[in-house]
Amino acid sequence: MTCPSTTVLVAGTGVAIPGVPQGAGLLAAVRPPHPPLPWPPSGRDTRFKDRATRIALVAAEAALAEAGLLKDGSLTVPGTTVGTVVSSNLGNLDTVCRSADAAVRAGPAGLRVVDLPTACSNVVASSVAIRFGLNAVNLTLCNGATSGLDAVGWAVRALRSGRARRMVVVGVEPADPVPLHMVADQARAPGDRLLDGAAALVLETAQAAAGRGRPNSVTVTAYARRRDPAAAVRAVGAGKEAGLWLPPGHRADDGRPPHICAVCDMARTLPPASGALGVLQCVAAAAWLSVTPPPGTPPTALAVSGGAPEDDAAAAVLLSALSSMPRPGLPGPPRPHCEEAPPER
Amino acid sequence: MTPVLITGAGAVSCLGVGVPAMWKALCAAPEIRPRPAADPGARMRLPLIHPAPAEPGTDGRATRLALTAAREAIVDAGLTSSECARAPVVLGTGGGNADHWERPLAAARPAPPGFTVAAALATAIGSGAGATCVSNACAAGGFALAIAADLIRTGEAEVVVAGGAEAYSRVALACFNRMGAVDARACRPFHRDRAGTVFGEGAAVFVLETADHARRRGVRHAYARLAGSGWSCDAHHLTAPEPAGSQIRRAMTDALDEAGATTGTVGCVVPHGTGTRLNDVVESQALGAVFGDHAAHLPVYSLKALIGHTAGAAGALGALAAALMLDHGTVPPNAPLGPEQDPHCPVNLPQGPSQPLTGRHILVNAFAFGGNNVSLVLEGSAA
């Protein structure tokens, strides 16, 4: 059942970046220190996983835990109600290129059996679903600069279509040798490498959150994908103002509304995040909105990605503190008759 | 619920270029043997594939196949350039432009991204409404169509260009060789002696639109409606299906429910059926569980026996086969399987002459590594 007015809440967030303990850490305008511990973490059950999967699992677990959906490592709700969307532009490229190398040198006998499933493009999303038992929608997006915000948009769509009640959205990029090689010619400064981390959001319909008695306060109000940042910003209804402005990449003014109160420019604080950027922006936005803003500050956060000449589109996501709903020109309160998802099976 | 019409279609596969060529071959059901891949670097025991005719060019091979199918679909639907401009593109592919990125590391050589098929397609047709590349392995094409339908039903688009494309992948074929999952003879889903799959190249692209949009454009012909989809994830294993098939059953029943179909209104199933041992057994049992007594007589049309496993294009090509069956009111014969059907796969695979389609719905399955499942239900446009 499709219900465009379904309210979508941020139920939990997780960050897997060395030196950034939680979402609020993304708001700090400092580059994180070098990892003090081996990174990414590896255990018995992740020993043969690719780097992107290991990092994504860390972020997803943190977000599910913060959402109150994990107990002793297991889901507290039916797996059929929870879906997964992963955004990664470079995810398992390292495995694929290593396998290509081995296949040329030695034929199939040179391939490592443990690499075979990892060479599949949807390995990260599948691994998150397997680890946590998530049986609803499972999507992988490799959508370029807008990929992270697109993943948030697709999760919202899945919730409003009744295909899930909760969605885990992960944005991840691994600093493997191959991705580093790929982005080397795009590096803007010496030492400008690639993000080696992930962020995750758990989104949940207001109905499902209320059923669990979760007092969530941040909502994903709107998502749009348009040809340029300004059009995307107008489409999400934030053409005039936003409390927090999270600009796209290195173009800090592309699509910026005339009135903003604070800026969180990840291009200044983190290495290039590619497919993880949009999810990182939304996690930072949720952290900012969860703290009561000063009087007169719009309780909204606007994230934009893409829109560079080499990109095919720009995307925008508007998040709001729940008390600000409904906003003029945006979807109104949920209609009770279509809020409920189908019965669980 | 907003009806989603299929008003244009395009295809390329080992059967040739174009929808008419595909339908003609489906009805003829020839025995097509796979060929060695045209890849000197394919150092493997069974480098077999069903190649598709790709147009020349510098784009990646998957992009070129997608463009061939998309151009046909747009002409078929009669979309104008202004209509193309506001049509989002959603394209599924398992390996993307593998010929561009599946290669050994070379520091001096630039490495173009592989998953640019949707973006390249959008650029080529002049779409400014956004391009989405869905990368759900062998279910990608099916998911792309389901996502496109959701775009229309949520009111975000009136018309969408969507489908799937897949080209030869040395890594994928080497991995399947390494797993011993390539059949040396042919792709033989549900055959007693099947020994794995055989990949095929191909693309199928559709123009999907609302009935209102089609009416305003003066559209006179629609192949079918994309009436429902069901999405699920096994969350079980990266390569093996969940043995009980509970999540693929859920995908099928959700798709039937969304379409308003019952088991009695389904006239045919286009299965995922790849020819791998366990997958075919699990899907057969799941079909039996979903359709009950009806399953014994329900025609199952095994497209992969004809064109091989087209991976990220498979769901879209399966949907095209279903749309053509609904349009013609005919179920074509399966590729010859002989009397050696696996008794553990008790599905009805009609061989011999084509038969009339009874029932106004067709179910299409697309499953993938990682337990990604999508089922589509198409409905005859005259229904």
Image (cartoon, coloured by chain):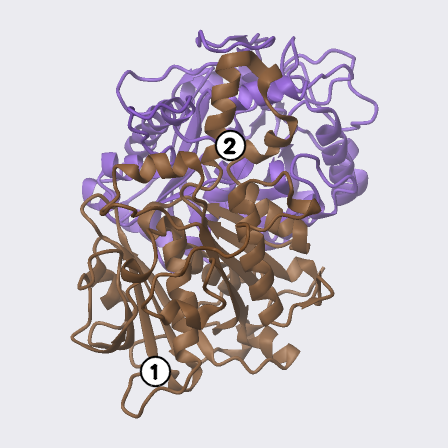
Residue A5 against residue B375 in the figure, above or below: below
Q: Write down the residue under mark 1.
A: A299
Tell me the number on the disc at residue A95: 2
Res. A20 visible in picture: yes
- Quadrant of residue A171 within the rendered picture: bottom left
Q: Secondary structure at mark 1?
A: loop
Give the foreground label among 1 and 2.
Answer: 2
- The x, y position of residue B334, in whole percent, is 64, 19
- The x, y position of residue A190, in whole percent, is 25, 45
Residue at figure coordinates x 67%, y 58% from the top left: A80
Q: Chain of mark 1?
A: A
**Dividing the image into 4 quarters, which one contains the N terminus of chain A?**
bottom right
Q: Amino acid at mark 2?
A: Thr
Q: What is the tally of numbered marks visible in this picture?
A: 2
Q: CA distance from mark 1 to mark 2?
A: 43 Å
Residue at figure coordinates x 31%, y 31% from the top left: B112
Q: Chain of mark 2?
A: A
Q: Horizontal placement of A60 versus A46: left or right?
A: left
- The colour of chain B is purple
Residue B18 against residue B248 in the figure, above or below: above
**Dividing the image into 4 quarters, which one contains the C terminus of chain A?**
bottom right
